[in-house]
Each structure stands twice: as structure tokens, then as C-alpha cells.
Image: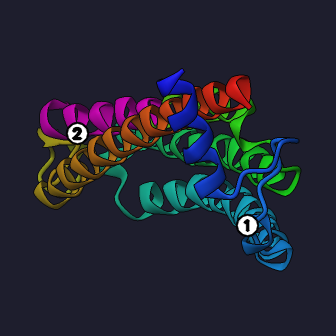
């Protein structure tokens, strides 16, 4: 009985009504949600344009520097897939905003979409790791007409390796942050279910 009284007191102190609604829900501004969804659509369009741009830029780069022709498609495919991971991650973000608008954040559906975002970040990390390894170790033979000889050409650059390392650290930090947020959300859902069972 003491635990139940404390739970009822906690629910009353939080201002939770008997129907499970949240009286502070007005703090979730519908205009902000609508603006974020507009930005998501804008980001999706930018990503599509970026994927087309990656393919075109790779062709132009190989035209200017034919010695790097062997690296064209590995980098192009990795770039297109990397942007696609970000595109896919925007879909669960849209759904999370919809859950907020419907007052359905604590139903457990948010956990699913959080897992999708974590999966997209993990896939992005794998692609960045591939680019880092390819950039560090890939070589190819190229016939130099000026030297009239075949030369060995490294397919990467130190600056790109540094960028990939920084990107991997950021992705790892993001995944850890999302895991912490998921655990907090899971705990909040469990506590809410406990309070609703008592009330």
C-alpha cells in the first residue's frame, strides 16, 4: 500500500490525469513539428540532388585526373550509399515527429524508429570505414604517356583519411547518444505504464 500511495502521489505531483493524458502537451508546438517536416522534405530533395552530383563529379574528376579512374566507382558507390543512409534516417525522424503530434511517444513505437536511426548510423559508419581502408591501401597501375612508363598510383589522400577518422568518431558518438536516449525512453515508458496501472 505504501508503494501504491507513493506512486499515486508521484502521478498527482506530475499532474497526470486519470485518462493518461499529459496536461503539459501544449508545450509541443505543432508549428515547430510542421516546420521540421518541411525541412525533412527539403533535406530529402537535397540528398537526391547530392547523389546525382556525386556521380557527375566523379566523372569530371576522372576526366581531369585519369590516373584515378580505378577509384571512380568505389568512391561513387560509397558516396551514393552514404547519402542514402541519411535519406532513410529521415523517414523514422518524420515518424517520430508524427508520434509527438499524436501524443503517442510512450506507446513503444518510438523505440522501433529509434532503432532504425541507429541502424542507419551503423551502416553509415561501415561505409566510412570502407572509404578509409580503400583510401589508405588501394593502389593501381597507370600508364603515364609523358614518362612512357607504367607507374603505381595510390588511390587515396591523407586529407580524406583524416576526414574519415573524424566522421567515424562523430558517428560513434551519435550512436552512443541514441543508445542512451533509447534507454531513457524505455525507462520512461516503463514508469508511465507503472503509473497508469496504479491509477
**Residue at figure coordinates x 61%, y 25% from the top left:** 194
Quarter occupied by residue 154: top left
Is most of the magenta stretch helix, strand or loop?
Answer: helix
Residue 132's mark? 2
What's the distance in space between the residues labelled 1 and 2, CA to CA?
47 Å
Q: Nearer the viewer, residue 114 or 181?
A: 181
Whether residue 13 is in magenta: the answer is: no
Instruction: Name the image quarter holding the C terminus.
Output: top right
Locate residue 50, reporting x and y percent.
63, 61
In the image, 127 versus 52, the foreground residue is: 127
Q: Is residue 26 left or right of residue 173?
A: right
- As drawn, is 153 to the left or to the right of 111? left
Judged from the image, the secondary structure of the residue bearing numbered disc 1 is: loop
Q: Is residue 24 left or right of residue 115?
A: right
**Residue closest to the eye, 51 or 21:** 21
Q: Quadrant of the N terminus?
A: top right
Q: Which mark is residue 24?
A: 1
| Residue 80 drawn above or below residue 7 | below
Q: Cβ–Cβ below 8 Å for labels 1 and 2? A: no
Callout 2: helix, strand or loop? helix
Closer to us: 75 or 168: 168
Mark 2 crowd level (few <14, some 14–19, many ≥20, 10 Å Cα): many
Magenta stretch: give its range: 122-142
Picture residue at 51% right of the left edge, 43% below the top: 82
Position of 158 relative to 141 (above/below): below
Disc 1 crowd rating (10 Å Cα; few below 14, some 14-19, many 20+) is few
Amino acid at each position: 500500500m505504501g508503494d501504491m500511495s507513493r506512486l499515486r502521489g508521484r502521478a498527482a505531483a506530475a499532474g497526470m490525469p486519470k485518462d493518461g493524458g499529459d496536461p503539459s502537451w501544449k508545450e509541443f508546438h505543432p508549428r515547430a513539428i510542421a516546420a521540421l517536416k518541411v525541412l525533412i522534405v527539403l533535406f530529402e530533395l537535397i540528398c537526391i540532388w547530392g547523389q546525382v552530383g556525386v556521380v557527375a563529379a566523379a566523372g569530371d574528376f576522372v576526366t581531369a585526373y585519369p590516373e584515378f579512374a580505378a577509384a571512380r566507382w568505389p568512391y561513387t558507390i560509397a558516396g551514393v550509399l552514404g547519402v542514402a543512409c541519411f535519406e532513410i534516417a529521415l523517414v523514422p525522424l518524420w515518424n517520430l515527429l508524427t508520434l509527438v503530434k499524436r501524443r503517442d511517444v510512450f506507446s513503444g513505437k518510438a523505440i522501433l524508429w529509434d532503432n532504425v536511426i541507429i541502424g542507419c548510423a551503423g551502416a553509415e559508419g561501415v561505409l566510412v570505414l570502407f572509404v578509409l581502408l580503400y583510401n589508405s591501401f588501394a593502389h593501381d597501375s597507370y600508364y603515364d604517356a609523358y614518362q612512357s612508363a607504367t607507374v603505381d598510383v595510390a588511390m587515396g589522400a591523407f586529407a580524406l583519411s583524416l576526414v574519415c577518422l573524424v566522421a567515424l568518431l562523430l558517428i560513434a558518438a551519435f550512436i552512443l547518444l541514441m543508445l542512451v536516449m533509447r534507454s531513457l525512453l524505455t525507462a520512461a515508458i516503463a514508469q508511465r505504464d507503472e503509473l497508469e496501472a496504479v491509477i
